[in-house]
Image (cartoon, coloured by chain):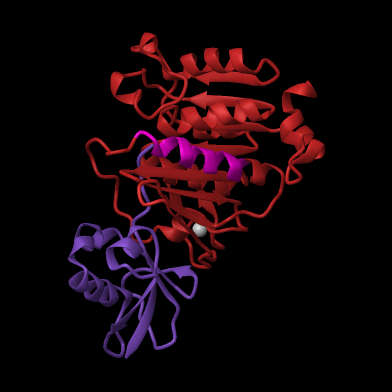
Amino acid sequence: MSIDRYRRQTLVKELGQKGQELLATKHAIVIGGGGLGSHSANLLVRMGIGGIDIVDNDTVDITNLHRTSLFTQEDLGKSKAFVLQEKLRAINTEVRIRGINQKVTKENIESLVKNADVIVDGTDSMSLRFIINEVSIKYNIPWVYAGVYETVGMVMGILPKKTPCLQCISQNIPESTSGETPVLGSLPAIIASIQCTETIKLLLGKPLAGLLIYDVWKQCFDTMDIKRNPHCPICGIKKHSLARGRII
Amino acid sequence: MKITVRLFGRYKDITNKDTIQLNIGEGNTLGDVIDCFVKQYPATEKDKSRMMMSKNKLYASFDTTIIEGDEITLSPPVVSGG
Ligand SMILES: [Zn+2]
């Protein structure tokens, strides 16, 4: 590992040389390479994660450019996963980087995440987030939820069976609304930055901040200290059967 | 009975407060708290079916009964875009 590359970062006492070395042994999977995923992957690679997979089956569209990182007009029509792979490899050759041009489903998620130390949420689908949540609890892989809407973003690091899972806080959430989500261009960068920091804290075994809510327009930041729901159908005492899509 | 609700996110802006006090009847639920809140602050109406509420640091469904002294929080819905 190049010492110079991370010199300024290892001076930060929260991380230090030890934390930097530990980070280099970790593997993350970023599900979704859009507004959140492109920024989070960019930061994780620059900050020295050991390996990263970025999964997205979409192509770069002109409507993505206002809120994403790394993509340019020349990338329009190309696979987001492959463009990110190429650009991130040019940023840091010490990181194992793989773009996977695939749609993440209930059927393939287990094989995609099985070698990951952490799952980073860059999806825009609530139903996919619940699939991530379930597989995270089943295989004890931490994940970091993040979402953006208009000027408000939320982030929550989830350590299976230790901190609340997405289902614990989602009793009143209906299915995703259809149509385009309004997002201010400056929002995903800051939410991804918070998400990336919570991801690194998770990987280093540091305590998480709970549920974070940030409004980039009002510059208003909240953290909510919440507990696990002992009756949660996903992380409670019951067993799981992801393949059958139900709790047993 | 009078209950205190701690607010998060844009609800603090809409109300201009960190916490609000609402008057609700005995045996009422978190859903009733939302009805009361939306009536007082109609700008929150669009979130009504998706608001997130916690009682004593646990997220809870709208049919959860509350009693005096419960610590209630109300926050905007989990956001879904990426
Ligand atoms: Zn749970």
Image quarter (top left, top right, bottom left or bottom right) of the N terminus of chain A: top right
Region of the chain picked out in magenta, as a range: A185-199
**Residue A188 appears left or right of A88:** left
Residue at image location 60% in from the left, 12% down from the top: A90
- Foreground residue among A87 and A220: A220
Residue B7 lies within the magenta run: no
By secondary structure, the bulk of the magenta-drawn segment is best described as helix
Residue at image location 53% in from the left, 68% down from the top: A230
Residue B78 coordinates in the image, percent (x, y)? 38, 53
Specify whether residue A1 is in view: no
**Residue A61, quarter of the rendered image:** top left
Colour used to depict chain B in the structure image:
purple
**Residue A48 appears left or right of A87:** right
Residue B18, compared with residue A240, is above or below; it is below
**Residue B39, quarter of the rendered image:** bottom left
Marker count (numbered): 0
Residue at image location 69% in from the left, 51% down from the top: A206
Residue A193 lies within the magenta run: yes
Residue B41 coordinates in the image, percent (x, y)? 21, 68
Residue B3, compared with residue A171, is above or below; it is below
**Residue A61 appears left or right of A28:** left
Colour used to depict chain A in the structure image:
red
Specify whether residue A85 is in view: yes
Residue B14, compared with residue A26, is above or below; it is below
**Residue A204 appears left or right of A198:** right
